[in-house]
């Protein structure tokens, strides 16, 4: 309380002597201190302009400006990637952040591996809106439980857990997570492999098992067949008995797509994929198109579908898709959907079922996970740049520095 009175006095004195240097606040450091100072000074100036500034008003405003609780003795500082403005990879900043203890229903996790997904780029560029600004990106990670919130059962310190989806914030050494959002990672699966496959694998699961149920005899078209999700899609659809057509950008990626179960691979930079699909299917078309590319492939994808076929648009790496007039779908009575993993895993049971199928397929060998690129977490900007420029193939994983 004496410290508070001292600082109230300093604020009053500063108002009367605006040229004096502001004294440091022992409770508030760096950016947060100056933010509160600026907020108070602005309020003081505005009040003075209205000729109603008084000592009481000064004290109340100052109290609000520095009304912070004493630091949490249990809080510690960890390193994380932070985004303060939208833009290119350069907006990803390596900073210190404070992390406290888990509350009721929460756990604290020390991350061992963090999955990089294209959705992280969408949020960074503003295609999707982040819930806060600044924010910590990332929606997939695997780590070890280091603390459990009060009253929580079913989790204990030392458990290896993973999550894919909400909440955002996995680009950090440690994080607080709702216990209901994590799943147990089987001991037979390496944490790096698990972090590279959980969100992408659950996306593939919803695409081939729930959004459209792939069955023997179906022909499917997968764009970006050598990408993180595309690689898993090709393997899973092949295992379900479908004929898989994949599009890629290079011969190297074509070789991987072949290994991952593509019966036909189209290098779209060398040949028109619509023409090739018609040749492969004898102009019958495919039952379903899985398109994560977006603007550059959307119209051609519609042309590849057979009557009553399903267009599944689940990404837009090449740009936002132009508005689609409904009559364009009516020509062949086509179906169009834009699925989101968050809606398909809306309940705990759905999450457990999807993750369980992914881990089971990894353990049985149905899914071969390719972790072709790893980067230190501090170099997330470089990882984003490489993914966005299509220099990567397979999965990309960020490893916390020092692990």
Image (cartoon, helix red, strand yellow):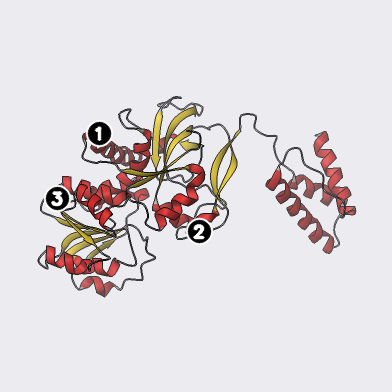
Given residues 128 and 400, the one toward you in this image is 400
Label 3 to label 1: alpha-carbon separation: 22 Å
Label 3 to label 2: alpha-carbon separation: 41 Å
Task: Bin the neighbour count of mark 2 within 10 Å (Cα to Cα): few under 14, some 14-19, many 20 and up.
Answer: some
Asked if the residue at tag 1 contacts the one at tag 3, i.e. Cβ–Cβ closer than 8 Å, the answer is no
Q: Position of residue 114 (x, y in %)?
A: 43, 41
Task: Bin the neighbour count of mark 1 within 10 Å (Cα to Cα): few under 14, some 14-19, many 20 and up.
Answer: some
Q: Which residue is mark 1?
A: 363
Task: Bin the neighbour count of mark 3 within 10 Å (Cα to Cα): few under 14, some 14-19, many 20 and up.
Answer: some
Q: Position of residue 287 (x, y in %)?
A: 17, 60
Q: Residue at x 32, y 32 (%)?
A: 189
In the picture shown, does residue 235 fall above or below 307?
above
Q: Which residue is mark 3?
A: 215
Q: Which residue is mark 2?
A: 88
Quadrant of the rendered image containing residue 288 = bottom left
Mark positioned earlier in the residue sequence (3 or 2): 2
In the picture shown, does residue 373 fall above or below 265?
above
Q: Secondary structure at mark 1?
A: helix
Q: Position of residue 20 (x, y in %)?
A: 87, 51
Does residue 201 appear left or right of residue 123 in this picture?
A: left
Does residue 37 appear left or right of residue 138 in this picture?
A: right
Q: Secondary structure at mark 3?
A: loop
Label 2 to label 1: alpha-carbon separation: 37 Å
Q: Position of residue 53 (x, y in %)?
A: 85, 56
Mark positioned earlier in the residue sequence (3 or 1): 3
Mark positioned earlier in the residue sequence (2 or 1): 2
Give the quarter of the figure containing the N terminus: top right
Q: Secondary structure at mark 2?
A: loop
Given residues 322 and 82, the one toward you in this image is 82
Asked if the residue at tag 2 contacts the one at tag 3, i.e. Cβ–Cβ closer than 8 Å, the answer is no
């Amino acid at each position: 309380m004496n410290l508070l009175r001292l600082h109230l006095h300093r604020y009053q004195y500063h108002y009367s002597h605006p040229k004096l240097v502001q004294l440091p606040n022992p409770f508030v450091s760096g950016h947060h201190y100056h933010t509160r100072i600026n907020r108070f000074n602005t309020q003081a100036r505005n009040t003075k302009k209205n000729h109603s500034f008084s000592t009481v008003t000064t004290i109340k405003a100052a109290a609000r400006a520095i009304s912070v609780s004493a630091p949490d003795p249990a809080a510690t500082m960890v390193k994380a990637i932070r985004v303060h403005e939208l833009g290119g990879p350069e907006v990803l900043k390596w900073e210190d952040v404070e992390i406290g203890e888990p509350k009721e229903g929460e756990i604290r996790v020390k991350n061992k591996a963090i999955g990089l997904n294209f959705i992280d780029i969408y949020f960074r560029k503003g295609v999707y809106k982040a819930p806060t600004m600044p924010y910590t990106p990332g929606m997939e990670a695997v780590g070890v439980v280091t603390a459990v919130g009060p009253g929580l059962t079913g989790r204990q310190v030392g458990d290896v857990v993973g999550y894919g989806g909400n909440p955002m914030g996995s680009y950090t050494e440690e994080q607080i997570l709702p216990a209901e959002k994590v799943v147990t990672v089987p001991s037979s699966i390496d944490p790096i492999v698990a972090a590279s496959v959980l969100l992408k694998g659950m996306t593939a699961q919803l695409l081939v098992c729930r959004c459209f149920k792939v069955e023997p005899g179906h022909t499917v078209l997968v764009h970006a067949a050598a990408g993180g999700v595309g690689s898993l899609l090709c393997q899973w659809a092949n295992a379900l008995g479908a004929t898989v057509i994949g599009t890629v950008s290079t011969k190297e990626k074509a070789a991987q797509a072949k290994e991952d179960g593509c019966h036909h691979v189209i290098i779209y930079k060398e040949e028109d994929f619509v023409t090739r699909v018609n040749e492969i299917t004898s102009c019958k078309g495919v039952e379903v198109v899985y398109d994560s590319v977006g603007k550059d492939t959307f119209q051609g994808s519609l042309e590849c579908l057979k009557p009553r076929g399903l267009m599944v648009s689940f990404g837009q790496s090449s740009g936002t898709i132009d508005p689609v007039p409904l009559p364009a779908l009516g020509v062949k009575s086509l179906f169009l959907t834009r699925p989101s993993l968050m809606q398909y895993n809306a309940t705990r049971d759905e999450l457990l079922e999807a993750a369980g199928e992914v881990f089971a397929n990894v353990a049985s060998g149905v899914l071969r996970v390719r972790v072709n690129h790893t980067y230190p977490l501090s170099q997330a900007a470089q990882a984003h740049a490489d993914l966005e420029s299509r220099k990567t193939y397979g999965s990309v994983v960020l490893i916390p520095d020092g692990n």
